[in-house]
Amino acid sequence: MPTAIKIENLSKQYRLGVISTGTLSHDLNRWWTTKILRRDDPYLKIGETNDRSTKGSSEYVWALKDINMEIEQGDVVGIIGKNGAGKSTLLKLLSRVTKPTTGVIKYKGRIASLLEVGTGFHPEMTGRENIYMNGAIMGMTRAEITHKLDEIVDFSGCERYIDTPVKRYSSGMTVRLGFAIAAHLDPEILVVDEVLAVGDAEFQKKAIGKMQDVSKGEGRTVLFVSHNMASINTLCNSCVILDSGGIVNFCETSKAIDLYRSLCLQKTSENFDFESNERIAKNTYISNFDICNKQPLSFSDKLNFKFQIKSKNKASITLRIAIFDINDTRVMAFDSADVGEVFDVQENCTTEIECQLLDELNFKPGIYRINISIRQGSILLDHIVSVRNIEIAEADFFGTGRYSYSDMPFCLKKHQWKIKQ
């Protein structure tokens, strides 16, 4: 298949907090260095990797850095990654909303994009007028747009409001009309951000079906950004995984989804702040949690956990551990109350409690995340999501026939608890 999009050494740099470089001195410095001295832009050397969760030392960040890829005509490519990974920036560059700092994008044909609610709409114009305006922007004649008009209106489901100004549309109606325009005005490349999540379930299903028809039936290229892995798996034949502005992998969809979920689990904080101001304000809270086993684990290992509980008042508590796989399916959960263990913690005291699993894990290889909580009767005192991960190694697993993967709320594994004041 011929190449529809070719991206070479694509990068986009932003300066935090201001538009452009923000100061006259910076602009003059850039102009003098690049135009007069014919040297490289000095500000391209000081940017930092785009990590939204940490404070950097530079005010320049690379939203995207050194992106290289080729997309063939007729491909449906998913773009996945955590918030701030660079997905929307990439689509804005492809849609020519903004210019790259370095690198080039080569493509064949017209691009239609739906990047956010109301993209390309004039709020004072009616739905019908906006259809003609968008078609004209894409280079279509009035006759071509008129030929498609009834089909667009019917697909959007907004016929009753088509002659009403778009400013009176709900966000769902705006997305419906925007997608209908983008999908029906014969673009060779369709770019859709996660804006479809605004629509209802019926429209999301309809939109995905249309994108499948556009790619398979008409041989057009679709780029689709979504956090809905079910939609990505249904629609896309390959996926790009972005993280901190760079490509982690570009591979087949099912492999990409598994890798992305593993990356998300690996990035759950091993440096969770158990003693944050918000937490120490509680009367009883978990001040530390450890997995005593050495990682990676074998499927035949028996897990050992250690809690540290701080309490300001006397309380009778129970502890709970829940383990989830990369698909967010709960594969094991056990509570001290299940085996009749209720722990009495003392006033202004630190209590250590251990939980040991007496049965083998028998989990599939992979990465699993752990949630923990404390209750006093039916009252939830503390709850931490994804506090730690465990990794089950591949070795000696296949062919044993010994693995048990339960979907029951409480896996029947023997366990015991010990308390130390």
Image (cartoon, rainbow, N blue to C red):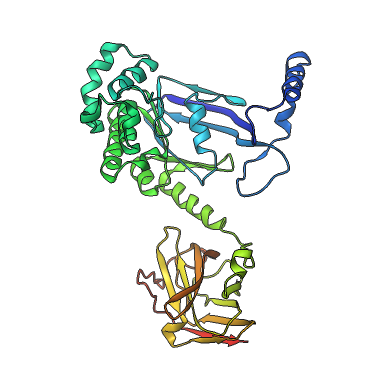
User: In the picture shown, does residue 193 fall above or below 134?
Assistant: below
Task: State the residue in front, 341 or 323.
Answer: 341
Res 219 seen here? no
Residue ID at (64%, 62%): 271
Query: Residue 204: horizontal and vertical position, in percent?
Result: 30, 41
Residue ID at (53%, 76%): 303
Q: Where, quadrant-wise, is the C terminus in this rendering? A: bottom right
Most extreme residue toward the right, as rendered? 37
Residue ID at (46%, 70%): 322
Task: State the residue in front, 259 or 168.
Answer: 168
Query: Residue 111: horizontal and vertical position, in percent?
Result: 41, 23
Residue ID at (41%, 19%): 109
Query: Residue 127: horizontal and vertical position, in percent?
Result: 29, 25
Figure quadrant of residue 134: top left
Task: Specify whether 335 is left or right of 391.
Answer: left
Q: Where, quadrant-wise, is the N terminus in this rendering? A: top left
User: In the picture shown, does residue 244 fall above or below 406?
Assistant: above
Figure quadrant of residue 418: bottom right
User: In the picture shown, does residue 348 fall above or below 48?
Assistant: below
Task: Specify whether 151 is left or right of 29.
Answer: left
Query: Residue 360: horizontal and vertical position, in percent?
Result: 47, 77
Task: Specify whether 131 is left or right of 147.
Answer: right
> How many numbered badges does the structure rendering display?
0
Res 92 seen here? yes
